[in-house]
Amino acid sequence: MNEAGAARRAQPEFRVLIVDDDPDMVAYLAHLLKAEGLDVEAAYDGRQALALIADRAPDLVLLDVVLPGMSGFDICRRLKADEATALIPVVLITALEDSENRVRGIEAGADDFLSKPAKREELVARIGTLRRLHEMRKELEERRLAAEIQRKEAIRRAFSRYISPRLTEKVLSESQNEADVFRDLSDRAAVVALFADLRGFTHLAETVPVFRVVPMMNEFFAELAVAAHANEGTIFSMAGDSLLVGFNVPVAQPDAAERALATARAMVRRFQPIARRWKADFGLTVGIGIGIEAGEVVVGNVGSPSFMSYTIIGDPVNVAARLMQMASTNEILIGPRAMQALQAVLGQANGYDRRELALRGKAGRVEAFAVRVAAA
Amino acid sequence: MPENAYTVTVAKDLEDLIPEFVENRRRELESLRAALAAGAFERLRQLGHRMRGVGNSFGFERVSSLGGQIEEGATRANRGELEARIAEYADYLSRVRIVYE
């Protein structure tokens, strides 16, 4: 192979489909294109052309206008109407003086025209230009795709710190761009809300040097987040020393109450070794208090355009928060509606300590069930 | 018509394609004659159109110009014109001389 041949071979493959019913014209065009190092296929009518394109899309179609059956315009129109083939450049072969056909070709979406008789220099120049354009377009498309993947990955990384992996996937699959994220997720939904907080936080903040507090809180939240995500809960907020987790949102979880209880138990157990270490290192007595309640909430993106958070708002969230405040260290307080859901699954509430509690902001007393998690 | 009017210069690299091209022109001549005998003007128009497109591409300008005239004659159903042009085409094909450069 000579140097020119080697250089051509080094270029990416470029396949041209010639569609012409005249075998001499096909032979002529194929000869010129092969001499330029291009791969060539031929079809002698529209049906054959479309079948070949569907089987393996070429990089360019050189299309005669007058064909038996389907015309070159028809073929061009079909290719341009189909998303899968719309970007393949189409060169229509028309007589130079035939302006009517050129207009029809433009209307059909042709990218360029080649005059009959086909002059070698003109053919090579036009194909060369379209090849460069096509390769540039392909490269831009590849870059656009790479940027899109990168953008989604960035969103995935950012969101996966706060919300469950399943919600991240839902957001990514449903949104076309950043502006759409969460936009359509506002809804009323039956959820199970779980509130957990760190018992002994005030003492910790007073006793431990400030520079150690944040890493310790991160350690605390990390364990709770693992417990929440292991049960496919969605973390709606982390504020101060407390954490709000929702179940049955945004994806349906028929066993949401069980998941919430399993999460609560896992949170207490996972935190116990850390609590022991903090006791040893700093003399702190810490643990977790948890409240769980079920019911209907509003799920949505709440805030201002500059700061928003995906959250749940409603009575069950408030009750869960109050129950959390009233729970003793390493105790889980379950509200009446969450308990009802649990009983439907687990049978009678044996092993649960039933209490009548007066919750701040609530008229009358609320029936709650307490579960203590034994030390591991 | 002078003899040199039937001399065609063809690019050297197209040489391999020419025997088939010329053979196809001879078949085309038979098709033209058959179509004329049958009074199939649309077929004549199509054959003329094809000649017009392919001739010049290979360097056979005469084939293209005759093709244009046949296409035109068929559109107007001008039998006399078509007979004359087809006879001219037959003469051309029998006498054409090809030079490769």
Image: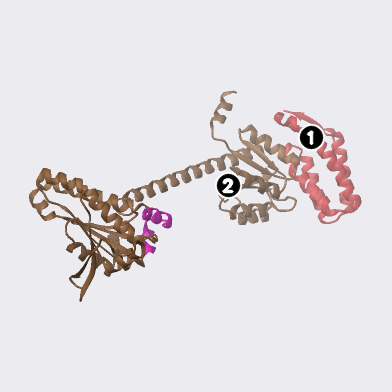
Chain colours: A brown, B red
Asked if the magenta segment contains residue A337, the reply would be no
Label 2 sits on residue = A88
Check disc 1 and give the amino acid type.
Glu
Q: Is residue A290 left or right of residue A109?
A: left
> Which residues lie in the magenta part?
A166-185
Determine the residue positioned at 9% across, 47% down: A283
Q: Which quadrant is home to the N terminus of chain A?
A: top right
Determine the residue positioned at 82% across, 49% down: B70
Q: Do badges 1 and 2 share one subunit?
A: no
The circle drawn on residue B20 is 1
Q: Chain of mark 1?
A: B
**Where in the figure is residue A185, as x and y percent of width and height?**
37, 63
Check disc 2 and give the amino acid type.
Ile
Q: Chain of mark 2?
A: A
Instruction: Give residue B20's quadrant in the image.
Output: top right
**Residue lying furthest bottom:** A363
